[in-house]
Amino acid sequence: MMHKRVRTYQLVRCGERRKRKNGRRAVRRCVLAGALALTLAGTVLTEVHSSNQALAADAEADHSCEAMGYYGSAGWETLADGENIFTAESVQAVNEILAAGFEAELPEVVQKDVQKDVPKERCDILVAIDAGHGGEDEGCSRGNVREKDINIEIAKATETLLSDMGYQVLLIREDDENRSLEERVQIANRAQADIFISIHQNACEEQVSKVSGIEVWYNETKGEAGSKRLAQLIHEDVLLYTGAKDRSLVADESLRVIRETDMPACLVETGFLSNKTERELLITEDYQKKLAEGIASGVDLYFFPKTMYLTFDDGPSEENTMAVLDILKRHNIKATFFLVGESVEKHPEVAKRIAQEGHTIGIHCYNHDYKKLYQSVDSYVEDFEKAWNVIYETTGVEVKLFRFPGGSINAYNKKVYADIAEEMTERGYIYFDWNASLEDATKHNEPERLLKNAKESTLGRRKIVMLAHDVVYNTTLCLEELLEEFPEYQMLPLTEEVEAIHF
């Protein structure tokens, strides 16, 4: 019943968008599926284009892609070993199939590889909200305030906010009804929810206690990788909206509802009923709304994060840059490296690895001598061209991005920076400054300080270009933690299409 209600709601909210697509769906899904299968199998895509008319005509008679024979190709199975062999054409084909609403028709091996990369609209996202306890199971209680009642009020407030934002919402229980832990898990799994959030209240053993605050629990042993990030985002935003005491994240394997759900999941303990002051807040509609706003905000950041471009200057160095690359690889993050030509000559294998692993390469300079570099436009261009040639000969990358040593405006280039910027722009190059920094090129660069600098300098902006230096040892010491400190950001490499940040 719940699953049917949710899917009906989806069609209502997305009806206009889906209606526009229905006229072309049957034909397009078969053509695109055929194109993708052939591409993955190694067949030249032009062969598919040349036969599109015939395929479309056949599809009019038989709308089944299975019947057309596209799903027998060994090309699908080439993804089973986990290797991503998508070409640009096949990725585009997958995106169009998903946009048309035919996710289920992609083989599982393809779905696993592309679902994490294909953005969804809010009305395609199903959020399961579990109001803990219910029925005979009251949960904890103090002073005639029962946990189950507070839970359902916060859950409903969250449902309203998320629905207004465009999300689908599945309430695991909608009123004061019994739901076993097994049922809660089954409802979410059968509905194929994208995330699962369980709402609870806390209490100490004693009847009255000074202990207060918010905890968010998650299971880090699950097969999926999003539970910790979901918990982080909800935890941070609920604290932001309520001003409650931070009792931190809790990693736990014992809670069934966040252990056995198939999707990223977390459990939010929104306060202590055993604390009189907090209990009086929790029963008010205003505070319940603040909690709901924090949860909804965390959910939205989970699916639609801000963007951070992590950039490294002054490399490569052999030991430190290699350590940075190892960490980025473990986290599957691509960054941008503004390289020094002389260092590329000293460590060519490191520069090659940067390129081979898909990071963006930019030019910093050939020689890091500010006085010589900024004597004139000609001296800058001469240095730049020398660096460009070294990097191209070493990596094969035709660099388009660059960063001024010291930034585009500094104490050494005040008289010439505007002329240099104009000249380089006319030559087709793009320069990037930064709007956040680890400040790791200073004497006081202890790892704890670098993390604090990075956090404080972002100022919550939606687009961040973060400055770091891969030649600094302490940067490598804090990088792992740094990557986990920004769950609200997706980390991407700079490209020519990114709007440049300038001082």
Image (cartoon, grey):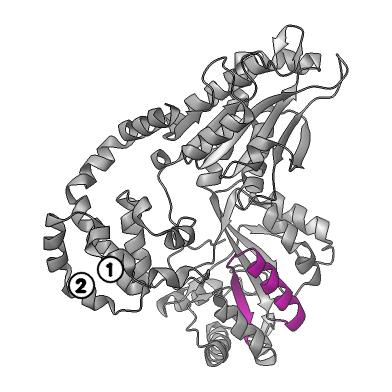
Kind of residue at badge 2 = His
The residue that mark 2 highlights is: 49
Kind of residue at badge 1 = Ala
Residue located at (20% from left, 52% from top) = 26
The residue that mark 1 highlights is: 35
Residue 178 image point, x, y percent = 59, 19
Please identify the quadrant where the C terminus is shown.
bottom right
Please identify the quadrant where the N terminus is shown.
top left
Residue located at (72% from left, 81% from top) = 317
275 displayed left or right of 303: right
SS under mark 2: helix
Spatial separation of the CA atoms under disc 1 and disc 2:
8 Å
13 displayed left or right of 485: left
Residue 374 image point, x, y percent = 62, 80
* Location of residue 293 with respect to 176 vertically, above or below: below
Residue 125 image point, x, y percent = 44, 41
Q: Residue 368 occupies which quadrant of the picture?
A: bottom right
Of 45 and 360, the residue lying toward us: 45
Q: Are discs 1 and 2 less than 8 Å apart at CB?
A: yes
Whether residue 120 appears in this view of the structure is: yes
Of 76 and 353, the residue lying toward us: 76
Label 2 neighbour load within 10 Å: few <14, some 14-19, many 20+:
few
Q: Which residues are magenta?
A: 317-341
Judge whether residue 436 is colored magenta.
no
Judge whether residue 339 is colored magenta.
yes
Q: Residue 476 occupies which quadrant of the picture?
A: bottom right
